[in-house]
């Protein structure tokens, strides 16, 4: 008797760790989604990528800190984030934008990050808040951009 092969949706692959990953082609390159416990989560990631690719003006232009909000807001909407979570990320994004400016993410440098930390410290913000919350938002934006193929490497 032959072993029955699992049937997965198109573009969803089983990952070696036991989860599932979506595989999309973005700008001619293969992009792998995050490893998910459920097939539905991998399909949701693929749907988000497809929606992004339906907006070619977003894929062709370089990703800046200002335009990255659309990417983050889409991810929060897909995750059905609570209103307070969205407000938290929007506030952290505004703080990053106010200090760093509308910088391209692929040109983000360590001195710019150090300048951001110094300016926030001078305003009396706790270093823990700066690193864990505000720069955590920047890390999430960078990881989202990398997962959908909009950013080649992690500048942080």
Image (cartoon, rainbow, N blue to C red):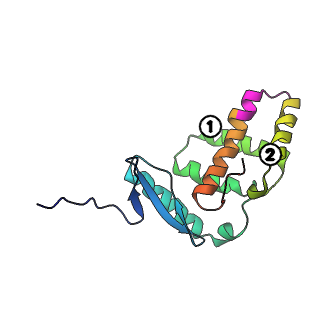
Query: Which x, y percent locates residue 84?
Result: 62, 37
Residue 4 lies, in percent from the top left, at 20, 59
Q: Which mark is residue 110?
A: 2
Q: Position of residue 62 (x, y in %)?
A: 73, 65
Residue depicted at 67% across the width and 66% down the height: 58
For residue 13, what is the image quadrant? Answer: bottom left
Residue 52 or residue 8, whichever sits in front? 8
Q: Which of pointers 2 and 1 indicates the residue nearer the eye?
A: 2
Is 12 above or below relative to 34?
below
- Judged left or right of residue 128, residue 38 is left
Q: Nearer the viewer, residue 82 or 126?
A: 126
Q: Return the mark for residue 51.
A: none
SS category of the residue bearing label 2? helix
In contact (CB < 8 Å): disc 2 and disc 1: no
* Range of magenta residues: 123-131
Residue 135 located left or right of residue 39: right
Q: Residue 124 in magenta? A: yes
- The residue labelled by disc 1 is 84
Q: Answer with left or right where residue 94 lies relative to residue 46.
A: right
Q: Quadrant of the N terminus?
A: bottom left
Cα distance in 3D space between marks 2 and 1? 30 Å
Residue shown at the point (75%, 33%) measured from the top left:
130
Residue 2 falls in image quadrant: bottom left
Q: Quadrant of residue 94?
A: top right
Residue in the picture at 78% in, 26% down: 126
**Front residue of 108 and 1:** 1
Crowding around mark 1 (Cα neighbors within 10 Å: few <14, some 14 to 19, many 20+) is few
In the image shown, does 42 or 72 lie closer to the viewer? 42
Q: Residue 86: where, in percent of width, then height?
A: 63, 43
Residue at the far left in the pictured view: 1
């Amino acid at each position: 008797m032959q072993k029955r092969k699992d049937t997965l949706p198109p573009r969803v692959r089983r990952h070696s760790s036991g989860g599932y990953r979506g595989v999309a082609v973005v700008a001619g390159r293969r992009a792998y989604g995050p490893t998910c416990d459920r097939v539905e989560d991998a399909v949701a990631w693929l749907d988000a990528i497809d929606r992004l690719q339906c907006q070619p003006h977003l894929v062709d232009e370089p990703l800046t800190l200002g335009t990255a909000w659309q990417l983050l807001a889409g991810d929060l909407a897909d995750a059905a984030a609570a209103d307070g979570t969205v407000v938290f990320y929007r506030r952290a994004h505004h703080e990053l934008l106010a200090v760093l400016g509308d910088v391209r993410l692929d040109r983000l440098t360590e001195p710019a990050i150090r300048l951001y930390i110094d300016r926030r410290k001078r305003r009396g913000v706790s270093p823990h808040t700066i690193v864990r919350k505000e720069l955590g938002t920047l890390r999430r934006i960078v990881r989202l951009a990398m997962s959908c193929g909009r950013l080649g490497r992690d500048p942080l």
